[in-house]
Amino acid sequence: MLIGDYLRETISGKTLYRILFQQEVFKASRYIKGRVLDIGSGGNLTYAKYLPKEIVHIRTDYVQKEGVSQVLNFNERFPYEDSSVDTVLLFHNLYIAEKTNHVLVECRRVLKDGGCVLISNPFGVNCMPEPRDFGRLTKEGFEKALEESNLKIELLEQIGDRFSVCAYALNAFFLIWPVKLIFNSLALLLDTLIPSGMKRKQPFPLGYFIVAKK
């Protein structure tokens, strides 16, 4: 983890889940290239500084907002031609999709051969009706959904673990950033002490971060 970014994001009020997610974007930036379709990004991106500078970034949302390039309802057919983008970003919104398989199939359709879709989705976090919250996928759930959509998993990482989940759940009670910093840092330390067998057999992450290729 980038320590400087961790401190700045904690001071700015970001949750531990958001901080850890941004670190995953940074680590996976090599997969992001060319014409990038960012689904449900809105206009204000917390992860923008981790994206490669040379990309053509298409920001979308289900309603028009400042900074949004195009309105996109991912429950319908995407308004893009087949094989027309190099990368798709699907961050923090697959859980609101009415049909997960439809979204993934559409991501594959618009991707060029060899292109990647990057997915981040919550798991051990509170319900977030924005505007809806239909469910979470486990590791096995993602593997099945991506296989059915004919997308090959390149990377599947857990975001956080049990103690991070606890820190996230209590975040609203940490009224000042020094308290958040102490609890978040302790949670991250304790996560490293969880036996690898338990993490593998009984995963309990904040979320999952995935890269899948067409």
Image: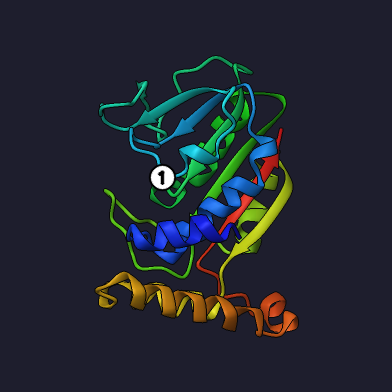
- Quick check: can you spot residue 77? no
Residue drawn 69% across the image and 83% down it: 198
Extreme residue toward the front, this view = 4
Residue drawn 75% across the image and 82% down it: 197
For mark 1, what is the residue?
A: 46
Q: As drawn, is 61 to the left or to the right of 50?
A: left
**Front in this rendered view, residue 27 or 62:** 27
**Front in this rendered view, residue 58 or 213:** 58
- The amino acid sitting under disc 1 is Thr
**Front in this rendered view, residue 21 or 197:** 21
- Quick check: can you spot residue 114? yes
Decide: is 206 above or below 21. Answer: below
Decide: is 59 above or below 101. Answer: above
Q: Which image quadrant is residue 75 in? A: top left
Residue 60 screen position, x and y as percent: 39, 28
Query: Dot 1 lies on which element?
Result: loop
Residue 133 screen position, x and y as percent: 34, 56
Residue drawn 37% across the image and 59% down it: 14
Q: Quadrant of the C terminus?
A: top right
Residue 65 screen position, x and y as percent: 25, 29
Scheme of image coloration = rainbow
Q: Quadrant of the N terminus?
A: bottom right
Task: Tell me the crowding category of disc 1: few under 14, some 14 to 19, or many 20 or more residues within 10 angstroms, Cα based.
Answer: few
Residue drawn 48% across the image and 65% down it: 123
Decide: is 23 above or below 109. Answer: below
Total count of labels: 1
Q: As drawn, is 124 to the left or to the right of 208?
A: left
Q: Which image quadrant is residue 81 in? A: top right
**Front in this rendered view, residue 120 or 133:** 120
